[in-house]
Structure formats: C-alpha cells, structure tokens
Image (spheres, rainbow, N blue to C red):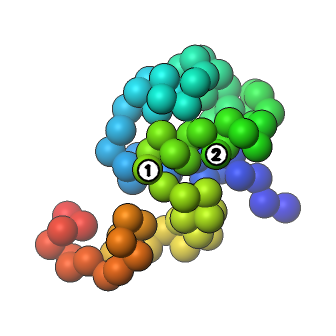
Amino acid sequence: MVDVRDYIEPAIQRSGMKKKAVASKAGITDQQLSDIIAKRRRLDANEFVNICFAIHMKPNDVLVLGIDPDPTYDHKTRSEVTEKEVI
C-alpha cells in the first residue's frame, strides 16, 4: 500500500528547502510536519497540496519522485538535466 507521507521528506530534500520553511509556507507548524513525516500524524489532502506548493512541486510530481527518484529528472521544467547540474 502506498503511503504519501513516505514521499514528502525526499521531495523536501530535493527542493533544497529547510523543513521549518516548508512548514511555515504550508501553514502548519514544524512539529506537525515532523509528525507527518514520522507517520505519527495523518496527512490531510489539503496539507499535502500546501506542502507541494511550498516546495514548488505539483502533487503528482511528488508522487512520481517517490516512485522513481531519478536525480536527472527536473520537476520544474520536466526536462532532462545534465549530470553536472545534479551534482
């Protein structure tokens, strides 16, 4: 069974943002975000969308990232990036 909460932390790391900044932009506390990531708290659909917008990713892109964490995939332009840009 898929648990969307498994995809949030990798997406945040990929965005380069701090969790505290993501939580603030998503309208939740940093403790709530931590609890969501640790699966101590349920994730509301609206919160998921707000987290995605906070890290500048579409919800579908976060799910795809969780299924296939390809470091050459650029979620912003949906194009291939060079290996140099990934490193």
| Left or right for 60, reference 11 | right
Disc 1 is placed on an element classified as: loop
69 relative to 2, above or below = below
Q: Which residue is mark 2?
A: 49
Q: Amino acid at mark 2?
A: Val
Residue 12 in view: no
Q: Which residue is pictured at 55% across the width and 64% down the height? A: 61
Q: Amino acid at mark 1?
A: His
Q: Which residue is pictured at 56% across the width and 40% down the height? A: 51
55 relative to 30, above or below = below
Question: Which quarter shows the C terminus?
Answer: bottom left
| Left or right for 70, reference 59 | left
Residue 29, which numbered label? none
Comes first in the chain, label 1 or label 2: 2
Q: Position of residue 49 (x, y in %)?
A: 64, 45
Question: Which quarter shows the N terminus?
Answer: bottom right
Q: Are marks 1 and 2 in contact (CB under 8 Å)?
A: no
- The crowding category of the residue bearing disc 1, from other C-alpha atoms within 10 Å (few below 14, some 14 to 19, many at least 20), is some
Residue 29 in view: yes
Residue in front for this viewpoint, 26 or 42: 26
Q: Which residue is mark 1?
A: 56
Q: Position of residue 71 (x, y in %)?
A: 37, 70
Q: Quadrant of residue 37?
A: top right
- The crowding category of the residue bearing disc 2, from other C-alpha atoms within 10 Å (few below 14, some 14 to 19, many at least 20), is some
Q: Which residue is pictured at 20% across the width and 79% down the height? A: 82
Q: Quadrant of residue 64?
A: bottom right
Q: Position of residue 78 (x, y in %)?
A: 41, 76
Q: Residue furthest right?
A: 1
43 relative to 14, above or below = above
Q: Which residue is pictured at 38% across the width and 49% down the height? A: 15
| Left or right for 34, reference 10 | right
Disc 2 is placed on an element classified as: helix
